[in-house]
Amino acid sequence: MNPKISVILPTYNEAGNIIRLICELHKILVTSRQSHEIILVDDNSPDQTAKNARNFFFAKKFVKIHVRKNQRGLASAIFFGISKSKGKWLIIMDTDFNHDPNVLLKFIMLMNQYSFIIGSRFINGGGMENKLRNAFSLVFNLYLRILLGHHVHDNLSGFFAIKKNVLNQFTPQKIFYGFGDYFIRLIYYCCLENVSIVETPVFYKNRIYGTSKSNFFQMFLSYSSTALKLRLNA
C-alpha cells in the first residue's frame, strides 16, 4: 500500500542537519499515525550529506535517498522528488530547521479541509527570528500579493503540503525551475484554478548549521521578474 504522505527534502551541504531532521519527522509522523516516506534529493553535496544519511538510515525503508550528479537547483530537486513520490499528499520543506518539523501536525489537521496548505510567516502567529529579513520579506510579499492579485500572504515560504493530484493538473515544466520562484508560480496557478488554499502560521528560527544559500538582492530581482511575467501573461 502506498503511503499517505511523502515528505520531500531537497539538500545541498546539510550534513549537520539531515539526520536529526529525518528522525524528528519520522517520530512526528509515526506518533500521528500517518503512513509516510521521506525522500531526500541531494545535489551531490561535497559535505557528504547523502552519504551520512545513507549510513545512518541504511536499513530504514521509509527513507529514500537520491543523489543527482548532473543537475543542481532547488526547484528541479523538488520536482525530482515529486516524480519519485508515492504519497497522496506531498510535504515540501527546507532542511536547515528554518522550517519547524512540528508544523507537520498543523498540516495534518488541515488535510481533510484543504488541498494546498502553506506555512506562512505573515499571518497572525507567524514571523522570523531575523527581524531585518522579516521586515524585507514582509514588504516584498505585500508587493507580490498586490501585483499578482490573490489573497496569499507568503509567496516565498516554500514550506507546504499539497495533494499530489492537484499538482497533476498543471504542467510541471511551467512551475518547477529556478530557485524559490517556483513557489510564486505554484501559488499563482493554484489561485487561478480555485484550488482550496489555507495558510497556517510558522515562525522561522535562525538556521542551526551551515550558511544560507539565499541572496536577498538577487532574489528580489528574480522573483519580481517572475511575478511580472505571470501577471503580463495572465
Image (cartoon, grey):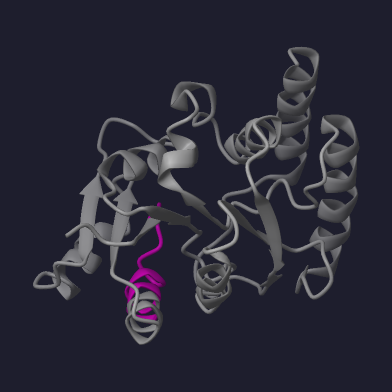
Q: Position of residue 186 (x, y in %)?
A: 60, 36
Q: Residue at x 82, y 64 (%)?
A: 123
Residue 21 highlighted magenta (yes or no): yes
Left or right of 131: which side holds 160? left
Q: Is residue 85 above or below residue 143?
A: below
Q: Position of residue 23 (x, y in %)?
A: 33, 79
Q: Is residue 32 above or below residue 168?
A: below
Residue 4: quadrant of the picture: bottom left
Q: Residue at x 26, y 50 (%)?
A: 86
Towards the viewer: 156 or 44: 156
Towards the viewer: 189 or 20: 189
Q: Position of residue 147 (x, y in %)?
A: 87, 31
Q: Residue at x 35, y 43 (%)?
A: 82
Residue 105 highlighted magenta (yes or no): no
Q: Position of residue 12 (x, y in %)?
A: 40, 52
Q: Is residue 164 visible?
A: yes
Q: Residue at x 71, y 26 (%)?
A: 226
In the rendered image, the quadrant that contains the C terminus is: top right
The part of the chain drawn in magenta is 9-24
Left or right of 6: which side holds 216? right
Q: Is residue 115 above or below residue 219?
A: below
